Every structure is written in structure tokens, then in C-alpha cells.
Image (cartoon, rainbow, N blue to C red):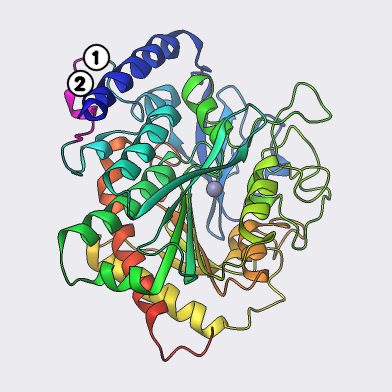
């Protein structure tokens, strides 16, 4: 009972500290705009290196640029986000301390935790709360410390932890600014637990009889904290590089399968800098040693949440010249996931090879060393990346009112995925 009463209090204190710090110290984006360029736009044409590519596909390229950059009149473009500071503001919790709706209920597992995005401290408190509520199902573990001394926490969900079942890994937040991926990983986990406890014979019980789960909702705790305290649009981790003014390594492409550091990802000031060697990002080392070094666990599935663009991506990322062994099955489960999302919310999620999304079909080296390829190469046959909403109106700055709708469509996607993997007819182990 004491623990239950303390949680809202601790969270209010953390939140008060955050609100006062936020007003004064956050990076100002009033001089920036996000544009959408059409017709296979080449960013090398831009008259500035101060640009950040948010999304690329065959139809358009979204780029954050300073307002005063002169754009060529012949380019085909529109303004996607005119007032970035306002878009950023809409992702934060309301500033009034009396915002009761943001305090998660502890008497039962309702969805109030998902009324707004939550900072790292609050999420870690919530992990402990899940453990205390479901001690027989949930264990929380730190798999090591990051550059800035944060714990990298994972949650194991199992109805019999001693049994070495096939294990499914679900991750979010590898790119710090993609907050919807963190809330979605948490939402999926909450629904799995909630439904398991609520019903006597249900599909979640079946899942937990067949699988163990590992959730890592915040793979990049340093970067995530930095987006709450200093720069909402930060993407990488916060490690030092050989250029002292440019911090951070892209964790996503810091893994050892086909890792290469070439002209597209070798400059520390770039958003896609993937370090000086494979596993240079501390978080990728920690994940590797937890998952695969001296571990008897058989990892079967991997779902990695990203944003934005509403896509389901299957391996490989590093090249479009190589096709996965179970290509047909991966495409089949991806289209099934897409269909389950459409039936839930009407939203369309495209199914494509990850190499096309990364751009490695056009620019060799893009996407080299990705976590998706790494997991697949380590025999996690059912490895997918899911890029969540939206398609650009808000980009990385999806307002908090979308947390539940996105969580809901992704939970149904997750259920479809698990049901597909349970199927004994599948020949892949
Ligand atoms: Zn991402």
C-alpha cells in the first residue's frame, strides 16, 4: 500500500523539475522549417550542410532546414511543418501541475499512463510498478550502464522463466526523438499483461505458453533523456566522438553484420554516424552481450519500432541484392500485419524491403550494420522493423493524443504476428 501511494508523489516531483527546466533550456527551433521535396530530390543540391533528412522514399524527401535558406524556384516542394517549436510543444505533457490525467492509476492497470508521453524516470518507475503488479510474470533487469550512466533496462515477460521457450524481442526508442515508439512498446507490453490477467482462456495465455518475451522500450536512454531536457529532435546516443563538438553514434547501425564506415556514415556530426567500429555504440555492445553472448535462449522474433512513415520493413537493410531465406514467409507475415492494422484503424502501412527504406539500393553503405540485419543474421528468423505513424504531417512530433490509437493498432499487429509464429505448420524453426 505504501508503494502504491508513493508512485504518484514521486512522479509529480520528477515532473515539476522537468517543467521548470524545459522552459529555459530547450533548443530553439524557431528558425527552422520542415520541407517536403518531390521528384527524387538530391540533398547535395542544397546550399547548406545544416540540413536533417527526416524521411526519404521514391516520391519525396522530407528535410529540416533553416528558414533563411534560399530554395531554387525550379524545385518541387511544399512546407510540411512551418512552426517547429509549436509542433514540439504539442508533444509534451501539459505544463499545469494539476493535470491529474497524466498520473497513472495504480489501483489497476488502466490506460491513464498513456494519456501523455513520459520521461525516462517515469517510465522506469512504471517498469517497477509492472513488476510489483505482476511479480509472477514480469522481471526488470539492467543489462548495463550507458555513457551517461543510465541503466539500460529490459523486461522479461514469462509465465515460467525457467522454461527455455522461443523468445520474442520487442524494442523501441533506438532513435531518441521517435517518442511514439517508446510509448508503443510500453502499450503493447501493458496490453499483453492486462489481457493475460483478465481472462481465463484467451489468446495471450496461449502466447505465454508458447513464448517468452523481452521488451526493451528505451534502447537509447541517454538520447531519450536528452530529448526531454535539451533537444527534442536529438536522434543518436550521447557518446563522445573524435570531434568534440559532435556527440552521438547512431545505435541502429552500430551492429556487426555488414558494418562499414564509409562516406555516408563516417562523419560524427551527421545523424547517421555509425561509429569507428562495429559495436562502437555502448548500447549495441550491451544488447549483443545480453542477447547472444553465453546465452542459451533461442530468439525467434524481433519487432523494432521506429517512426515515421507507416511501413513494415523486412531484411535486408544493407543491400537489395540479397534476399532472406524465408523471404516469402516474411512478406506474408508483413502483409498480414498491414491488414490487421487496416482493420483496426483504417491506416495503410506499406510493406517494403528495408534496403529501399534505408536507401542502400541507391547509395551503397546506407543502412550498413543495422540491428535488423544483425538480428536476422543471428537466426532470429522473424525480424521486422515497424515504422509507425504518421506519413509526415507531424513527422517525429506526433502529438500525445495519438499514443492510444497507435498503441491499439500496433497491439493488434503484435497479436497477428504472435498468432502467425505460433502456427505449427511453419517449417522455419
Ligand atoms: Zn528510427
99 in magenta: yes
Is residue 322 found left or right of 68 in the rendered image? right
**Highlighted magenta segment, given as a residue range:** 98-106
> Which element carries disc 1, helix, strand or loop?
loop
x, y percent for residue 254: 71, 49
**Label 1 to label 2, Cα distance in Å?**
6 Å
The correct choice, above or below, for 107 with respect to 50 in the image is: below
**Residue 240 in the image: x percent, y percent?**
75, 28
Q: Position of residue 53 (x, y in %)?
A: 60, 42
Q: Is residue 421 above or below residue 99?
A: below
Q: Magenta segment, principal secondary structure?
A: loop
Q: Quadrant of residue 367?
A: bottom right
The answer to whether 208 appears left or right of 366 in the picture is left
Crowdedness of circle 2 by 10 Å Cα count: few (<14), some, many (20+)?
A: few
Taking depth in this image into account, of 387 and 97 the one nearest to the observer is 97
Residue found 49% across the figure and 67% down from its top: 167
Q: Are marks 1 and 2 in contact (CB under 8 Å)?
A: yes
Q: How many marks?
A: 2
In front: 117, or 292? Answer: 292
Asked if residue 284 lies in the magenta stretch, the reply is no
The residue where tag 1 is placed is 96
Residue at the spot of label 2: 99
Could you classify mark 1 by the number of other residues whose Cα lies within 10 Å: few (under 14), some (14-19), or many (20 or more)?
A: few
Q: Which mark is residue 347?
A: none
> Does dot 2 land on a helix, a strand or a loop?
loop
In this picture, is 65 found above or below 289?
Answer: above
Q: Of 127 and 232, which appears nearest the observer?
A: 127
Amino acid at each position: 500500500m505504501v508503494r502504491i501511494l508513493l508512485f504518484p508523489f514521486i512522479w509529480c516531483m520528477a515532473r515539476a523539475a522537468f517543467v521548470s527546466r524545459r522552459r529555459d533550456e530547450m533548443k530553439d527551433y524557431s528558425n527552422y522549417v520542415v520541407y517536403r521535396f518531390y521528384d527524387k530530390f538530391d540533398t547535395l543540391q542544397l546550399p547548406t550542410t545544416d540540413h536533417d533528412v527526416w524521411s526519404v522514399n521514391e516520391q519525396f524527401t522530407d528535410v529540416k532546414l533553416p528558414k533563411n535558406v534560399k530554395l531554387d524556384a525550379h524545385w518541387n516542394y511544399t512546407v510540411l511543418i512551418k512552426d517547429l517549436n509549436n509542433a514540439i510543444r504539442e508533444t509534451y505533457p501539459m505544463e499545469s501541475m494539476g493535470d491529474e490525467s497524466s498520473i497513472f492509476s495504480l489501483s489497476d492497470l488502466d490506460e491513464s499512463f498513456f494519456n501523455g508521453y513520459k520521461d525516462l524516470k517515469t517510465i522506469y518507475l512504471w517498469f517497477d510498478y509492472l513488476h510489483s503488479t505482476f511479480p509472477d510474470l514480469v522481471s526488470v533487469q539492467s543489462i548495463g550502464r550507458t555513457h551517461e550512466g543510465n541503466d539500460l533496462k529490459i523486461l522479461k515477460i514469462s509465465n515460467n522463466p525457467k522454461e527455455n521457450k522461443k523468445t520474442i524481442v520487442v524494442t523501441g526508442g533506438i532513435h531518441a526523438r521517435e517518442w511514439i515508439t517508446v510509448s508503443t512498446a510500453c502499450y503493447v507490453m501493458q496490453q499483453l499483461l492486462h489481457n493475460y490477467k483478465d481472462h481465463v482462456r484467451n489468446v495471450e495465455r496461449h502466447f505465454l505458453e508458447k513464448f517468452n518475451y523481452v521488451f526493451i522500450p528505451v534502447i537509447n536512454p541517454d538520447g531519450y533523456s536528452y530529448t526531454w531536457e535539451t533537444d527534442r529532435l536529438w536522434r543518436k546516443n550521447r557518446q563522445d566522438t573524435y570531434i568534440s563538438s559532435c556527440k552521438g553514434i547512431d545505435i541502429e547501425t552500430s551492429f556487426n553484420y555488414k558494418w562499414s564506415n564509409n562516406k555516408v556514415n563516417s562523419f560524427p556530426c551527421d545523424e547517421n554516424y555509425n561509429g569507428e567500429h562495429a559495436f562502437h555504440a555502448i548500447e549495441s555492445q550491451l544488447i549483443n552481450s545480453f542477447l547472444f553472448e553465453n546465452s542459451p535462449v533461442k530468439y525467434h522474433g524481433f519487432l523494432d519500432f521506429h517512426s515515421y512513415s507507416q511501413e513494415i520493413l523486412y531484411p535486408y537493410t544493407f543491400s537489395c541484392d540479397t534476399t532472406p531465406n524465408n523471404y516469402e514467409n516474411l512478406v506474408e507475415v508483413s502483409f498480414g500485419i498491414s491488414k490487421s492494422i487496416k482493420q483496426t484503424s483504417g491506416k495503410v502501412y506499406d510493406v517494403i524491403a528495408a534496403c529501399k527504406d534505408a536507401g542502400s539500393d541507391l547509395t551503397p553503405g546506407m543502412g550498413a550494420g543495422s540491428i535488423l540485419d544483425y538480428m536476422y543474421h543471428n537466426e532470429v528468423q522473424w525480424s521486422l522493423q515497424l515504422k509507425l505513424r504518421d506519413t509526415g504531417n507531424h513527422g517525429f512530433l506526433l502529438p500525445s493524443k495519438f499514443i492510444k490509437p497507435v498503441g491499439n493498432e500496433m497491439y493488434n499487429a503484435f497479436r497477428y504476428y504472435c498468432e502467425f509464429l505460433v502456427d505449427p505448420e511453419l517449417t522455419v524453426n
